[in-house]
Amino acid sequence: MKIIAAGRDMARRRAWELLPEVRERKRRQRSIRYEQLKAAGTCPNCFLRPRGDTGILCKQCAETRKRVSKNNYYRLRDDAFAAYGGYICACCGEDEKVFLTIDHVEGGGNKHRKEINADHPGNFYRWLKNQKYPPGFKVLCLNCNMGRHRNGGVCPHRETKP
């Protein structure tokens, strides 16, 4: 009986915490605490070490955040490429990872990235994942991608030569 009651209490607490006024109050409390730590020169992430010279976080927390962020980016990128056929150019067969990119099949990639506010490739990969990898994209190498851009949407590999 105690387990069931504890489960109900947890559900009630979660529902209570979802109320807008409760969320706003907690957000204000976090903001005040953050400003206090910042003013005291303490890292707001670990609450232990003094802030680093270059930013708000201490050196260890900044390095950890950078490493985690980089790993998340590579995971998003790998998932996106896997969803669109893997690390191989759909036109010429190039398979070197650093040369590959995801292309908008119908063109308009720059406009689309601005619409979804993808100022960093990780934001674009995250958008693809959130949209469940929609059709209209394919993997191309940078040469084929730029060739299509400069050649009216046709890759120079596909163009017939006289």
Image (cartoon, grey):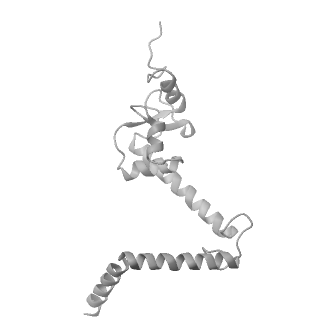
Outermost residue toward the right?
53
Q: Residue at 60%, 60% (x, y): give it.
A: 67
Q: Position of residue 134 (x, y in %)?
A: 34, 44
Outermost residue toward the top?
162
Q: Residue at 68%, 70% (x, y): give it.
A: 58
Q: Position of residue 17 (x, y in %)?
A: 37, 79
Relative depth, front residue between 94 and 10: 10
Q: Residue at 41%, 36% (x, y): give it.
A: 138
Outermost residue toward the bottom?
2
* Res 45 quadrant in image: bottom right
Q: Position of residue 130 (x, y in %)?
A: 38, 53
Residue 116 in sight? yes
Q: Is residue 11 left or right of residue 43?
A: left
Image quadrant containing the N terminus:
bottom left
Q: Position of residue 25 (x, y in %)?
A: 45, 79
- Whether 138 is drawn above or below 160: the answer is below
Total residue callouts: 0
Relative depth, front residue between 68 and 49: 49
- Whether 24 is drawn above or below 94: the answer is below
Q: Residue at 64%, 78% (x, y): give it.
A: 37
Relative depth, front residue between 50 and 31: 31
Relative depth, front residue between 136 and 17: 17
Residue 78 in sight? no
- Whether 124 is drawn above or below 39: the answer is above
